[in-house]
């Protein structure tokens, strides 16, 4: 049992379950010192039983103001005082006799006769002149009956001391139990060793102290007969045991008293959940709350009584009813406790997370400010730098600002680009075209990056027929509705017969025109940019461009060489064409880099024409 209910609490806080088996009275034909000690133990335990079950309970009723008719009972305290009383008691006189050198068992008996001859529970031949009592005996009238003790051997058995050298020898044992049975404090040469009677009395006092600190429950056993036979009941023996055990008085107290009592506070806290008026809290006195609880369970008024500090319940059935209601209400209380606890735990976790988020927010804010201050320090004079901070070393951003650092660098690059574009002045459009050309040609085909994009090369002063060109351009605008020239230059065009033919090519905001290089008149008609299907070039370092038109338009494809003036101008031509195409059709111009390109420059609206191919391997060849 002890191992089952064991806990990790300290020794002072742990719970102990003990079972005490009382000796039982020993009444033999001749009783000695041993029977005297055993019967003294039974007398003390009976006194404790009386104090607990009869005297204490009745005193509690009186103390709490409960109406009570006292039940008379025999209190054996007078017998216990006769045996262990000080300075005059049987054990005290026995110890005194052991100290006197010439004392004998009979002198000890004479001393008891002188001190206890008039005691109502002591009797000897000297005090009563009863011939039934032997000269060496005395009678104690115990609660269980009269017992005659022979004093022969009392002094010798009481002097049965344990020598110090034996105690010291036992202390050297490695067995913990033996060491505990013979502690160090037993060896004290300055004190007189205590006698067996005193040892027994002290041990009995310790037992009573343990019982006083516990909540005892009694099982009274009745010996039905002295023959140890089944289904045999001796009336006189049974009646005698019931009388001396005080069971009749105990039953009278129990029947007239109350089965259960508890303080107002503890009773209210235990049963408050079975009444909706008192759960979860009651604003008022506990006694009023208890009355409300009992009334809610329809318990009659005669079943309970209020004392000054406690409530008393008459019958166990009433208590069982309350316990049953409490047991039925406990699951809902448990659910409520779980709900409150889970809510508290969830709120605590949320508060912790919220606190962590706030800490992170302030830390990130601090890190961001620190990083921005470092960036501001590095780029303090960026406006006066010729490269606008291109070669500045960026400070390393903290991990939480890695993306922010990349955004700052992107913002700086955008700002630097705007500044550089702003400084270009009229060359802004040229720069935009070069950026477009870079996106198209970078890593795909060699092109002349440093060259200026002059757009309209036929309008330059180097053209001896400039005036004639300007006149024809104005007529072109009037005739076809174009508004601006985006690119114009001399090219070599491959005609439908596969022959090279010099021509002027003009790109406007809507069309691509082929002009006669001598008079700048439009040859036949222009090619609407909206009808362009794609543009093809080789990945080699040539200057050929194939502009292919959709089959539905019936327009001929253009195979042009834009490097006849000694400069690479296909990058400028394709970039301008891509910009205009995106503006008109709202999606990118398909551009391909191929080693072999097919084209059809003999197609008309009525004839499908012939598909030709051109291959590039260093030098282009037409097939």
Image: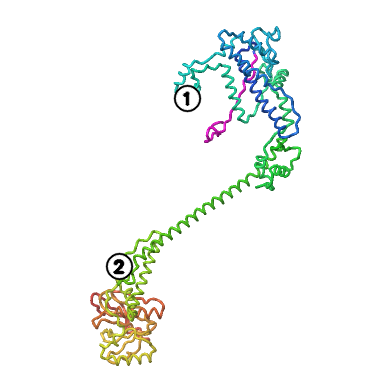
- Was residue 19 drawn as part of the magenta stretch in this picture? yes
Q: Is residue 496 visible?
A: no
Residue 278, how many percent across, how many down? 68, 46
Depicted 262 relative to depicted 185: above or below:
below
Q: Give residue 166's mark.
A: none
Classed neighbour count for the residue bearing mark 1: other residues with Cα under 10 Å, few (<14), some (14–19), many (≥20): few
What is the quadrant of residue 300 in the picture? top right
Residue 390, how many percent across, how many down? 31, 69
Q: Give residue 176's mark.
A: 1
Query: Which quarter of the rendering shows the C terminus?
Result: bottom left
Write the start and end of the magenta stretch as one range.
1-27
177 or 416, which lies in front?
Answer: 416
33 or 593, which lies in front?
Answer: 33
- Was residue 590 drawn as part of the magenta stretch in this picture? no
Residue 21, how many percent across, how many down? 61, 23
Depicted 453 relative to depicted 33: above or below:
below
Q: Secondary structure at mark 1?
A: helix
């Amino acid at each position: 049992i002890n191992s089952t209910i064991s806990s990790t609490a300290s020794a002072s806080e742990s719970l102990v379950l003990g079972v005490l088996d009382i000796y039982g009275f020993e009444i033999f034909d001749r009783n000695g010192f041993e029977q005297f000690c055993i019967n003294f133990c039974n007398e003390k335990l009976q006194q404790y039983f009386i104090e607990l079950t009869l005297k204490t309970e009745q005193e509690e009723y009186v103390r709490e103001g409960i109406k009570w008719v006292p039940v008379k009972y025999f209190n054996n305290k007078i017998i216990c005082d006769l045996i262990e009383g000080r300075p005059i008691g049987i054990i005290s006189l026995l110890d005194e006799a052991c100290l006197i050198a010439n004392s004998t068992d009979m002198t000890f008996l004479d001393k008891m006769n002188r001190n206890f001859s008039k005691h109502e529970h002591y009797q000897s031949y000297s005090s009563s002149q009863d011939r039934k009592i032997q000269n060496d005996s005395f009678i104690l009238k115990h609660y269980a009956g009269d017992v005659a003790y022979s004093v022969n051997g009392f002094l010798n058995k009481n002097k049965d001391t344990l020598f110090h050298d034996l105690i010291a020898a036992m202390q050297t044992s490695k067995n913990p139990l033996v060491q505990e049975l013979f502690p160090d404090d037993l060896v004290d040469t300055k004190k007189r060793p205590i006698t067996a009677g005193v040892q027994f009395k002290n041990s009995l006092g310790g037992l009573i102290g343990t019982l006083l600190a516990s909540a005892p429950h009694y099982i009274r056993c009745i010996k039905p007969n002295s023959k140890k036979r089944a289904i045999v009941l001796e009336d006189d023996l049974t009646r005698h045991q019931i009388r001396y055990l005080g069971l009749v008085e105990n039953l009278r107290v129990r029947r007239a008293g109350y089965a259960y009592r508890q303080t107002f506070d503890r009773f209210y806290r235990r049963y408050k959940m079975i009444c909706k008026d008192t759960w979860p809290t009651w604003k008022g006195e506990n006694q009023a709350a208890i009355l409300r609880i009992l009334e809610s369970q329809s318990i009659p008024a005669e079943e309970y009584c209020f004392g000054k500090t406690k409530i008393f319940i008459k019958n166990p059935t009433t208590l069982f009813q309350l316990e049953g209601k409490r047991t039925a209400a406990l699951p809902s209380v448990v659910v409520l406790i779980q709900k409150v606890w889970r809510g508290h735990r969830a709120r605590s976790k949320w508060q912790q997370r919220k606190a962590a988020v706030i800490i992170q927010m302030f830390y990130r804010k601090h890190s961001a400010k620190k990083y921005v201050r470092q960036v501001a320090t590095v780029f303090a004079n960026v406006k006066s730098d010729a490269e606008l901070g291109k070669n500045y070393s960026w400070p390393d951003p903290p991990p939480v600002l890695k993306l922010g650092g990349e955004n700052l660098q992107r913002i700086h690059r955008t700002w630097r680009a705007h500044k550089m574009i702003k400084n270009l002045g009229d060359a802004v459009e040229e720069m935009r075209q070069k950026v477009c050309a870079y996106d198209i040609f970078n890593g795909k085909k060699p092109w002349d990056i440093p060259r200026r994009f002059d757009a309209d090369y036929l309008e330059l002063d180097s053209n001896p027929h400039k005036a004639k060109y300007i006149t024809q351009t104005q007529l072109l605008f009037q005739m076809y509705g174009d508004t601006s020239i985006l690119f114009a230059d001399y090219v070599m065009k491959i005609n439908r017969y596969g022959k090279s033919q010099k021509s002027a090519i003009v790109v406007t905001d809507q069309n691509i025109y082929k002009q006669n290089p001598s008079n700048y008149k439009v040859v036949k008609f222009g090619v609407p940019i909206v009808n362009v299907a794609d543009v093809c070039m080789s990945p080699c370092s040539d200057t050929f461009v194939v502009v292919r038109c959709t089959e539905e338009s019936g327009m001929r494809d253009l195979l042009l060489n834009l490097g006849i003036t000694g400069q690479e101008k296909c990058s400028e031509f394709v970039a301008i064409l891509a910009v205009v195409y995106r503006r008109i059709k709202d999606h990118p111009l398909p551009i391909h880099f191929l080693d072999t390109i097919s084209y059809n420059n003999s197609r008309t609206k009525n004839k499908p024409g012939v598909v030709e191919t051109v291959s590039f391997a260093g030098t282009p060849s037409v097939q």
